[in-house]
Image (cartoon, rainbow, N blue to C red):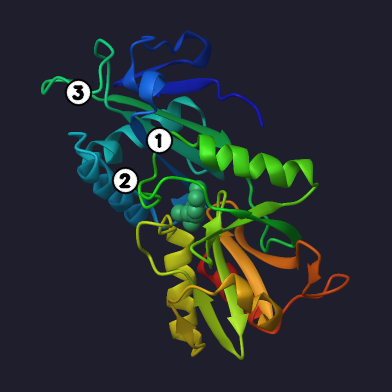
Amino acid sequence: MSYPDKVYLNGQIVDSAEAKISVFNRGFIFGDGLYEVMVQINGIFFYEKEHLARLQSGLHKVNIDFDVAILNNEIPKLLHAAQLTDVDCMLYIQITRGVAPRQHSFPSNIKPTVMIYAVPKVLPEINLVNAHVIIRKDFRWSRCDIKMTSLLGNVMLNEEAMQHDCYETILHRNGVFTEASHSNLFFVKDGAVYTHPADEHILNGITRIVVIELCHLLGIKIIEKAIKVAEIDSIDEAFLTGTSTQIAAIQNIDDHQLYSGNKKGPITKRLQEAFLKLK
Ligand SMILES: Cc1ncc(COP(=O)(O)O)c(C=O)c1O
């Protein structure tokens, strides 16, 4: 991972070393902000409309007054300055509530801070990883549907996976699997695909939505119902989804091995191949 050369900050494009915000920015003080990540593949942002719609919906939920339609003009300017127009890249957008003296309540006329950058990123055609994951309790707050910048819970849970040389940490709450530290979680059982419903305990990933659509298209039974931790031994396949993860097959859950070697489940493989055709 490297830093971008250029950053878009509140309407200006600046060298990233010159991009400065106030220490009283509520994004810095409270983590009071939202973000979005999308990838450009062959000159087109993959499901851009859906990513921007999720950002707009999140901004409404937390009462940050910003119209994401503005970004349709601003993103191309940033890409041009960063020499990434039509180049495969990852785009990061962060919108915080803005700057105000530190107290929980905020002034009604506060102006959001908008920061965008892009870095080159070429995703593999198919994610070939056979992921080893660990299981941990989902101790994050109860509004995981909001894609907020305060990711300390996710960072702590992800770090445990890193310490165990694992790819991800899959999470459970109230006896059922929710999602993972930075991806959504799917299981296959008796030929049907299961994933946690899109409620306040998970982020409704754009890749999650695409995979659900693909299941419908391919005639694979898809059930938005959480799998119980106690059901783990009856699972046939499991996989993770996310913007850069795409679809990653899970091989091991703690000591429970789903597959050996480079094998993966037939439904995971079918979905990966169908996903590739969308790009
Ligand atoms: C907690 C969490 N769940 C799921 C996802 C996957 O979302 P998407 O497919 O929109 O990238 C992410 C992505 O950042 C995430 O952080």
Q: Give the image location of residue 25, x and y in percent.
A: 33, 16
Disc 2, SS:
helix
- Whichever of labels 1 and 3 marks the residue nearer the N terminus, that label is 1
User: Seen in the image, is 183 located left or right of residue 160?
Assistant: left
Give the residue at mark 2. Answer: 55
- When asked about the image quadrant of residue 69, the answer is top left
Disc 1, SS:
strand
Q: Give the image location of residue 7, x and y in percent.
A: 45, 22
Does the CB distance between marks 3 and 2 fall below 8 Å? no
User: Seen in the image, is 113 located left or right of residue 174?
Assistant: left
Give the residue at mark 1. Answer: 93
Q: Give the image location of residue 35, x and y in percent.
A: 40, 38
Disc 3, SS:
loop
Looking at the rendering, in which quadrant would you find the N terminus? top right
- When asked about the image quadrant of residue 14, the answer is top left
Residues packed near mark 1 inside 10 Å, few (<14), some (14 to 19) or many (20 plus): some
Which mark is on residue 207? none
